[in-house]
Image (spheres, rainbow, N blue to C red):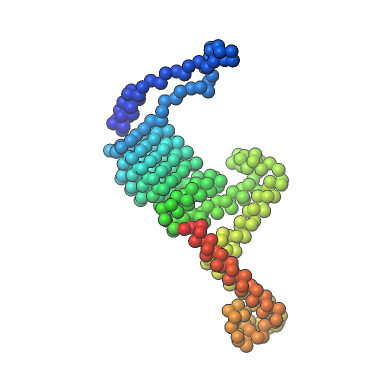
Amino acid sequence: MDRLFSRIKRFFSQSEEVPPPEPLAEEGGEEADVVPAFVQMVHPRPILKDFTFEKDVIKEKLQFFKIENANGKDKFFKDVNFKYARFEDCYFRNAEFHNCDFTGAKIDNCNFSQASFKDCIFEFTLFFSSILDFKDIKGSLPEKPNLKRDVLRNLRMNAKSQGNYKDSYLIAIEEMNSELKYYSKATFYKKSRKEDKFYAEKYPKPKDRFRNARLGISLWLEKQIWGFGIMPRKFLITILAVLIVFSGLDILVRWDLSWGSLWDSIKGVLSAFASLATKERDALPWWLTISIVIFRYISMGVFVAIILKRISRAS
């Protein structure tokens, strides 16, 4: 790292000194005696450009740095402060990051393929057009559900920009689960708990809790019935459960609890749902047959919508 900081020192020593701003003129043309505090000239952001990390980086402070076209392949980064740093066109393939802070960092067009992150912080971090596997960063996502949801949303868009459809689908599910957890905490928070202070201040009124409860229940039903609208297999299970309920209704009408009656009822319900002409179907009550047919058309429409939504959201 000696080379790194000698280069930074040389950068500062070669920079021209910025002259102080001219005093502002008051009304009447007279100059002000004091320059307002908000009129301050700050030194430009430190830049590491066309730089190669030649050895591991441990306990260094690189916050606010602009790291451009840097090569950190196979390097080990531990306890490094990358707060509000900007990474552009960097190559960190197979690098390891342990306990690094990426709060507020912006990562654009970088390669983190096969990189690993352990106990890192990714709050308010933004990724753009960067190669990154979701499984590598999943363990370092924020614990707070609202922060986690926002980071996941950005990661999903980044995965879409890279054509990573698998990660986009997995991230979408995690994103919705985080939003569901957020509504749960926003509804059942306790003012006495320190970790619930954010929710107590943001949603102090009972009507706010009721709204969060309503949104949470709606999202929970979406998860249970059709898997947030992007999990076809979840909806297939729901269809099967409803058909079992229809079979139970038929058995109650017949009041015959024998195994033979149960099997006939199941075959009749499946035949009505698949629009097959069988004697078991003809034995069903007319109102139950109509209900099954209506459910068939509704479920087919919803299933097609789920397929299209999954394609549009996770691809």
| Residue 154 visible to the viewer | yes
- For image coordinates 43% across by 42% down, the residue present is 120
- From the viewer's perspective, is residue 249 above or below residue 161? below
Is residue 241 shown to the viewer in this render? Answer: no
Residue 180 in the image: x percent, y percent?
Answer: 59, 53
Q: Nearer the viewer, residue 277 or 268?
A: 277
Residue 208: horizontal and vertical position, in percent?
A: 68, 46
Q: Nearer the viewer, residue 289 or 191?
A: 289
Residue 218 lies, in percent from the top left, at 64, 57
Q: Is residue 163 left or right of residue 282?
A: left
- The residue at 62%/88% (across/down) is 279
Query: In the visual, does 294 lie left or right of 111?
Result: right
Residue drawn where x is 44% and y is 58% of the image: 165
Instruction: Residue at the far bottom: name it.
Output: 279
Q: How many marks?
A: 0
Classify residue 65 as left or right of residue 173. Answer: left
Q: Is residue 147 left or right of residue 101?
A: right
Q: Examine the image and state in which quarter residue 59 appears.
A: top left
312 up-or-down from 1: above or below: below
User: Residue 90: horizontal and vertical position, in percent?
Assistant: 35, 42
Which quadrant would the N terminus be assigned to in this image?
A: top left
Q: Residue at x 51, y 61 (%)?
A: 310
> Which sits in the foreground, 253 or 149?
149
